[in-house]
Image: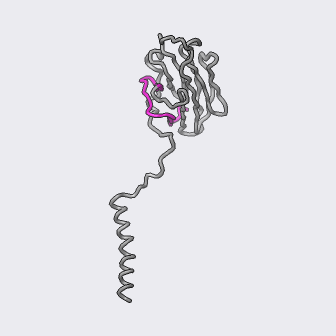
Amino acid sequence: MLKRFLYKLTGLLIVPFLLGSCATIAGVDESGPEPKSERTFPYDRFVEGKPNLDMRVEGGCYIWRDGNNWHVRVAKIIDRPRTLSITGPVITGKIRVKQGLIVNFSKQNIIIPNDARFVRNNITFKFEMRNDTGDNIEGFDFTIKPTGIDYCLTFDFLTDGVPTPGIIHLGSFLHIPEEMPLKVCLHSFD
């Protein structure tokens, strides 16, 4: 009976030791849960400065900043083929800010049916890339008034309802982000 008790006691002591050593060898997963679809990448240095070329050459969406002043433009490709259909892709999106307020929102060259709206510290927009309307470059500007040391902007752009980071161009060097939504966090310039 004492022998049986010692076997059980030894088994109870060895099992936790073995499990602990396996966790040490394999490593304990301390990374926590994956963040939601918004990854923070140091895009702050990529969004500085106006693009260095005519935006109509490649077309797409252009985002840049100077200080806390932000600019968003949607450009149709210059000399694009004119098809019989007047419809083209529809670019929609939303811009949200954390730890800051959007002020001085202004539309730039926006022609109906396209629109951009500023409501409750969010900007929403829709641009139809039609062949029969408007200028080749439309967009809007806004300023961020930080409420803390840092602020973050989330850009969520869709082309025909699908995230398409390949049409987004950031800053003067036209960096293309890896994914949408794009989250940019930076120090305030106030």
Where's residue 149, x and y in %? 54, 39
Question: In this view of the protein, can residue 73 be seen by the observer?
Answer: no
Question: In this view of the protein, can residue 60 be seen by the observer?
Answer: yes
Frontmost residue, 31 versus 112? 112
Q: Does the magenta stretch include residue 128?
A: no
Frontmost residue, 100 versus 89? 89
Going 46% across and 20% down the picture, which residue do you hit?
Answer: 51
Where's residue 49, x and y in %? 47, 23
Q: In this view, does 179 lie to the left or right of 13?
A: right
Place residue 122 in its image quadrant.
top right
Q: Is residue 76 above or below residue 63?
A: above
Q: Does the magenta stretch include residue 171?
A: yes
Going 56% across and 23% down the picture, which residue do you hit?
Answer: 90
Frontmost residue, 109 versus 33? 33
Q: In which quarter of the image is the C terminus?
A: top right
**Magenta residues (range):** 167-190
Q: Quadrant of the N terminus?
A: bottom left
Where's residue 144, x and y in %? 58, 31
Q: In this view, does 43 lie above or below 61?
A: below
Where's residue 54, x and y in %? 46, 15
Counting every numbered tag in the picture gives 0
Going 57% across and 39% down the picture, which residue do you hit?
Answer: 148
Going 38% across and 75% down the picture, which residue do you hit?
Answer: 13
Q: Which residue lies furthest to the right in this view?
A: 120
Q: In this view, does 158 lie to the left or right of 45?
A: right
